[in-house]
Amino acid sequence: MAVRLKESRGQEMALTAVVAVVVVVLSILPMLRLIMEIVAPGGSLSRAAIDAGLANSSTWVATGHTLVVGIGGTILAVILGTLVAVLVTLTDVRGRGPFVLCYVMPLMVAPQVTALAWLQLFGPASPLLRLLGLAPPLGARNPLYSPEGIILLLGVQYGPLVFLLVRAGLRKLPRELVEAARAGGADWFTVLCTIVLPLMTPSIMAAAALAFVSCVGNFGIPAFLGIPANYLVLPTLIYQRLAGGGPASLGEAAFLSVLIGVIAMAGILAQEAMSRRRDYRISSTSMIAEPYELGGWRLPVQAGMWILIFAILFLPLVGLLLTSLVPGYGIPLNAATATLDNYRFVLLEHTAASRAFLNSFGLSIAAAAFSVIAAIPIGYLIAWSTQRNVRLLNLAIELPYALPGVVLAIASLLLFLKPIPLTGIQIYNTVWIILYAYLARFLVLALRPTVSGYHQVDRALEEAAQVAGARLFTRLRTIIFPLVAPAAMAGGLLIFMTALSELTVSALLWSSGAETIGVVMFSFEQGGDSNYAAAISAIMVAITFVLMLVTNLLAPHLPSGVLPWRD
């Protein structure tokens, strides 16, 4: 028995060592390399990069723009997400399932697709507006090319993120407090303002912090809407610096990326500081009061909710689809001009686009497969291990995803600018550096549902196998993996959907022959070929929606909350 126990501990130590190596390579090394480039470029301490960045006026202009759109987008996302969460969770509206699926979909769609869809809806060449006779004259400025347009789309993009977090908090709302207030004669609005929202303050603030980090680090929306208006934020400023200066600009880009990370972390720290100013603890064993009966207001409220879906989802997608069917800019859509040639061109004729589809599918599948396989043993250590350093392990894995993607992209460039030591392998300017960044950034998306799966598994089976003499690796393969695999696979599907149209990371890492779908889409739009970009975007939206529906098949076997669009 002592020998078996010693072997089991030895295997757990070996597993911990392997996991530690993975975490160091994917999370710690790139961040250390980024910091070293700023404080010790060339191996010696220097303030040159910091001083140069601080002295450049464009740094402060872009920082101001970043704060404006970050704060504005966060405020709009919090208002929309909280309102929708309250209506869906606390009232007797019908059709929650389809509504939540539609409302969450913008979060699952790449930001550049959202930006392109809205641009094609409101632009002077909009086929939909031209059909309705409402299009402005050709050559007129698109109203979305403005900071207000960026704020609007950031709010639409991340309102669902706020919705998911606030809804999770509302599900833990103490029933007795709400019912006591109702019994005392308080109307629903009074209950909402005096009980529900005060108790939901931690959830709302946490959601606001995540939305702020997402808005600050977003590249797709500011790139599509801001660059044409010369309204640069920090991520687009970094992109322009690297596009114009190449590797020689990496020092300045490193400083700007760290500045983005500092702004993002400042938002998170501000949220934590505000949360500590008040005690929000509640004592309750009964959660979620009976839904508030809207009575005669139910139909108008439901109509308003679906009008919101129509405005933020269906209308932009219709504009995107119609644009993909016209042969060129400004050509009206009718039976004579409608064509599928744009789809044929991007799928079969354009070499870079065809290659980008293969690259993105390969990268997404590889990132999802690696993350699913790695999440099983890592989740085991996080959920069930008694070692003291487990919390640090979890935080290290979260770091590349918690920070804006541009930070990881610059860190990856710096880390692999030279060949890998001892091997001579060069992955800079290849598709492999993008894969590395995807592995580092998206691993946590598979880990979170896997850990939730471990928490809902009865460990007695694993302990019985251990008593019977099964070693750790045997238990992982024969008992644990079958139990938590559905949750890990659901996380893998989320990674696949997220990575397939990703742009923030690949925009800084791609090279000729290593294009991704997001990069080609951006190139088409920047080059004035909006119809080709719309065709690619329409394909990606269709794939995303189909994958969301297919993933629902796993729902009966998954822990609650793994699929964000399901109750």
Image: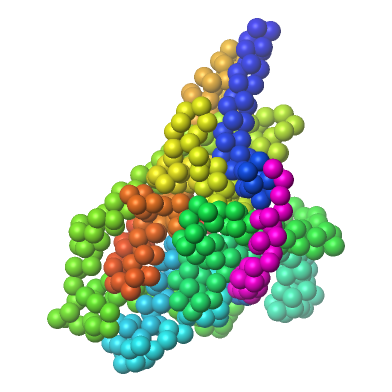
Q: Nearer the viewer, residue 278 or 355?
A: 355
Apparent side of residue 391 relative to residue 247 in the rendered image (left or right): right
Q: Residue furthest left?
A: 336
- Tell me which segment is drawn in magenta: 44-69
As drawn, 131 above or below 451: below
- Asked whether 21 falls inside the magenta stretch, the response is no
Residue 490 spot, x, y in % from top left:
47, 45
Residue 363 spot, x, y in % from top left:
39, 45
As drawn, 563 above or below 371: below
Apparent side of residue 321 relative to residue 200 in the rendered image (left or right): left
Q: Main secondary structure of the magenta part?
A: helix
- Asked whether 57 falls inside the magenta stretch, the response is yes
Apparent side of residue 385 relative to residue 428 in the rendered image (left or right): right
Q: Nearer the viewer, residue 326 or 482?
A: 326
- Picture quadrant of residue 255: bottom right
Residue 294 spot, x, y in % from top left:
59, 78
Q: Nearer the viewer, residue 9 or 21?
A: 21
- Picture quadrant of residue 184: bottom right
